[in-house]
Image: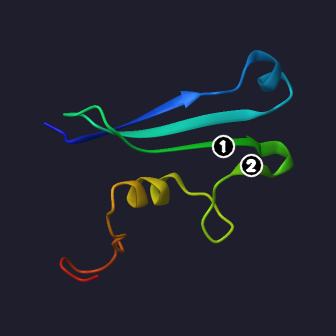
């Protein structure tokens, strides 16, 4: 059984979507305790290249958020096993 789970919620309403705005909330929870480990929210207008939300080094990456929320280290997929 998994210890953690991530949920994605759509924050954009019908009017937002009509204007090309997307909104998302990502929450990471401990599935045994229900404790929220981390939450992030962002809005974007992809066609215009616009983004509003927390970012690292000027870029937003859902994988990066999940890795930071869980206190993990990023591993290069091309690296040999055990190499970091």
Indicate whether 1 appears above or below 79.
above
Report x, y in % for residue 63: 46, 55
Residue 14 vs residue 30, the one in the foreground: 30
Residue at the image position 61 percent from the left and 58 percent from the top: 60
Q: Are marks 1 and 2 in contact (CB under 8 Å)?
A: yes
In the picture provided, is 2 more to the left or to the right than 29? left
Circle 2 sits on which residue? 52
Local SS, label 1: strand
Task: Reply above or below: 48 against 61.
Answer: above
Residue 43, above or below 77: above
Q: Residue at x 82, y 43 (%)?
A: 47
In the rendered view, how is the structure colored?
rainbow
Across and down, in percent, residue 41 comes to 61, 41
* Residue 61 occupies quadrant: bottom right
- Few, some or many residues within 10 Å of mark 2 (<14, 14–19, 20+): few
> Who comes first in sequence, dot 1 or dot 2?
1
Q: Position of residue 71 (x, y in %)?
A: 33, 62
Residue at the far left in the pictured view:
1
Disc 2 secondary structure class: strand
Q: Residue at x 74, y 43 (%)?
A: 44
Residue at (82, 18) in percent of width and height? 15
| Quadrant in the picture for the N terminus | top left
Quadrant of the snapshot with the C terminus:
bottom left
Asked whether, in this view, residue 49 is left or right of residue 26, the answer is: right
Camera-side residue of 72 and 48? 72
Q: Badge 1 is on which residue?
A: 42
Which quadrant holds residue 6? top left
């Amino acid at each position: 059984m998994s210890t953690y789970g991530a949920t994605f919620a759509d924050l954009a309403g019908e009017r937002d979507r009509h204007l090309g705005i997307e909104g998302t909330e990502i929450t990471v929870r401990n599935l045994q305790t229900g404790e929220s480990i981390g939450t992030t929210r962002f809005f974007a207008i992809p066609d215009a290249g616009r983004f509003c939300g927390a970012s690292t080094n000027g870029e937003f990456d859902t994988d990066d958020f999940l890795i930071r929320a869980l206190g993990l280290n990023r591993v290069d997929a091309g690296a040999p096993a055990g190499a970091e």
